[in-house]
């Protein structure tokens, strides 16, 4: 029997925002085996005529990823986009300095656009503001988006792409505040450069939307000042500022680890405050929204990565093997993004395949789902519509770094068109089932379609190519009695309660 109870009231009119589907974006960087051996492996039994792995493409389609950031990441700050277009036999091999590998340039802008189409995603293209700048950025927009009749648009056509790619979302560089970044800059240097790049990119194609680099993480010593300075320079020419954050359970403290999403929420709120401060300062009517374009759990592979031989091709870098507790935190991070859907319009789980990723592959072998695949797939599939703001009362606990952590982490998404209501919930309690009581009387005639549960007695359990030890079941006990939903949420579990009008 559940000894703990939590309550929520869900009302149609208590709206946070419509979900921008790009919140379920992901990220593919020329890093490790993400591209080579991940999405692309010619000669693999599952490879199509272009060398793309069909088994991987199928798993990406299952994740319902609408937007993929490309080609980096740290990689983009040393990347010449011209190296990756035109006949493959003429493409140069380069020393890739961000991750100290050899880049073959077999995959570039056009191939990636083809792959994105194959999996039903749009491209979120990053330009190099590390070693390059305004000129290369405008040329790439012209190459990708201008119809024809100019040097770069005709170059694209000569490469076999008559129709422009019409890439809508563009990132102005990557993590330019980081000392590790090729061509790192001060906030003023970057803000000036990003603004000039933004201006000319929009002269080429006024329909594009631009993301300025925020801090590489909230722990950067320049955090907050960086955002304020960058936005001071770029405010009129960009639509978004980026956030990056990764978490790990290095101290093996599950209660504290699962509370990390509170820190993520606080980070989001801080960046909103800074953006709105600059809005006030400029007396602007325009609101800058957020692109949380790198987020995930990342810590398992840190030691292994120190041992990689430099200048190899597509070595196994950043290959975190995720366990069950990681899936719980990823669920809470997704709930956090949804709760802030009024300002977070783009988010990219970093990354998509092999590199800190929900999908793993073996070269020449199978592809499989990591534990974190499931909460992402559930949210991306059922979290479309309007995020509601439920009134929640939950037991709380304190951990090493956090006080008043709600045992119940939850949100609800209402899809009016499909007449569906979905409640996403994590029970953070280490010992007890949590009895959830949800008042949904506002949703007349709704019945429970299914109650999906991801649970496991072993927090460290992982999935492998041959064993999906961590996988969801639909045996949850949620039921609706005249607008009163009750559900037992097992200890340390991810839950999806789906309701639909009869």
Image (cartoon, grey):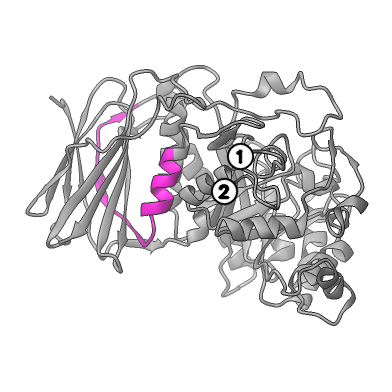
Q: Residue at x 32, y 44 (%)?
A: 410
What residue is disc 1 on?
A: 353
Q: Which label lies toward us, 1 or 2?
A: 2
| SS for callout 1 | loop
| SS for callout 2 | helix
What residue is disc 2 on?
A: 57
Relative vertical location of residue 440 with respect to residue 336 in this rendering, above or below: below
Image side of residue 459 versus residue 306, left or right: left
**Could you classify mark 2 by the number of other residues whose Cα lies within 10 Å: few (under 14), some (14-19), or many (20 or more)?**
some
Q: Residue at x 65, y 70 (%)?
A: 282
Q: From the viewer's side, name the closer residue of 163 and 442.
A: 163
Quarter of the figure with the C terminus: bottom left
Among the two numbered marks 1 and 2 on one chain, the one whose residue lies closer to the N terminus: 2
In the image, the segment drawn in magenta is: 374-397
Relative vertical location of residue 493 with respect to residue 343 in this rendering, above or below: above
Give the Cα distance between marks 1 and 2.
Answer: 10 Å
Q: Which mark is residue 172?
A: none
Q: Position of residue 27 (x, y in %)?
A: 63, 47
Q: From the viewer's side, name the closer residue of 99 and 475.
A: 475
Q: Residue at x 69, y 44 (%)?
A: 40
Quarter of the figure with the N terminus: top left
Q: Position of residue 117 (x, y in %)?
A: 61, 61
Q: From the viewer's side, name the closer residue of 88 and 478.
A: 88
Q: Position of residue 54 (x, y in %)?
A: 58, 47
Which residue sits furthest bottom?
Answer: 149
Q: Residue at x 67, y 59 (%)?
A: 114
Q: From the viewer's side, name the closer residue of 455 and 412.
A: 455
């Amino acid at each position: 029997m559940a000894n703990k109870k939590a309550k929520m009231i869900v009302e149609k009119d208590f709206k946070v925002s419509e979900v921008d589907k790009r919140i379920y974006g992901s990220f593919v960087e020329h890093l490790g085996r993400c591209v080579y051996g991940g999405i692309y492996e010619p000669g693999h039994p599952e490879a199509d005529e272009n060398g793309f792995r069909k088994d991987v493409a199928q798993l990406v389609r299952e994740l319902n990823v609408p937007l993929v950031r490309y080609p980096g990441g740290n990689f983009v700050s040393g990347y010449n986009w011209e190296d990756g277009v035109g006949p493959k036999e003429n493409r140069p091999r380069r020393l890739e300095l961000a991750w100290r590998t050899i880049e073959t340039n077999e995959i570039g802008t056009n191939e990636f656009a083809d792959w994105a189409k194959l999996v039903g995603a749009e491209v979120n293209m990053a330009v190099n503001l590390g070693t390059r700048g305004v000129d290369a950025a405008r040329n790439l927009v012209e190459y990708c988006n201008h119809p024809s009749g100019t040097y770069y648009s005709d170059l694209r056509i000569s490469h076999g792409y008559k129709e422009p790619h019409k890439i809508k979302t563009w990132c102005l560089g990557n993590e330019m505040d980081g000392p590790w970044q090729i061509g790192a800059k001060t906030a003023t240097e970057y803000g000036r450069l990003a603004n000039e790049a933004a201006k000319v990119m929009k002269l080429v194609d006024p329909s594009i939307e631009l993301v300025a680099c925020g801090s590489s993480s909230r722990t950067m010593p320049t955090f907050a000042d960086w955002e304020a300075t960058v936005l001071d320079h770029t405010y009129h020419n960009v639509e978004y500022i980026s956030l990056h954050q990764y978490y790990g359970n290095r101290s093996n403290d599950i209660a504290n680890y699962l509370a990390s999403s509170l820190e993520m929420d606080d980070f989001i709120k801080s960046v909103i405050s800074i953006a709105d401060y600059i809005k006030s300062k400029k007396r602007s009517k325009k609101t800058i929204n957020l692109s949380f374009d790198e987020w995930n759990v990342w810590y398992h592979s840190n030691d292994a990565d120190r041992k990689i031989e430099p200048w190899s091709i597509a070595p196994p870098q950043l290959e975190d093997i995720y366990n069950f507790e990681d899936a719980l935190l990823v669920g809470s991070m997704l709930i956090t993004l949804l709760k802030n859907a009024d300002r977070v319009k783009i988010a990219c789980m970093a990354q998509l395949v092999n590199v800190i990723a929900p999908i793993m592959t073996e070269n020449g072998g199978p592809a499989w789902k990591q534990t974190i695949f499931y909460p992402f797939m559930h949210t991306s599939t059922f979290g479309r519509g309007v995020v509601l703001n439920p009134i929640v009362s939950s037991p709380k606990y304190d951990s090493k770094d956090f006080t008043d952590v709600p045992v119940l982490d939850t949100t609800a998404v209402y899809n009016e068109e499909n007449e569906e209501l979905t409640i996403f919930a994590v029970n953070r309690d280490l010992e007890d089932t949590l009895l959830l009581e949800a008042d949904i009387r506002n949703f007349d005639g709704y019945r429970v379609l299914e109650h999906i549960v991801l649970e496991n007695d072993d927090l460290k359990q992982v999935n492998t190519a041959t064993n999906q030890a961590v996988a969801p079941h639909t045996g949850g006990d949620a039921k609706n009695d005249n607008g009163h939903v009750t559900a037992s949420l097992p200890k340390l579990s991810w839950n999806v309660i789906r309701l639909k009008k009869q």
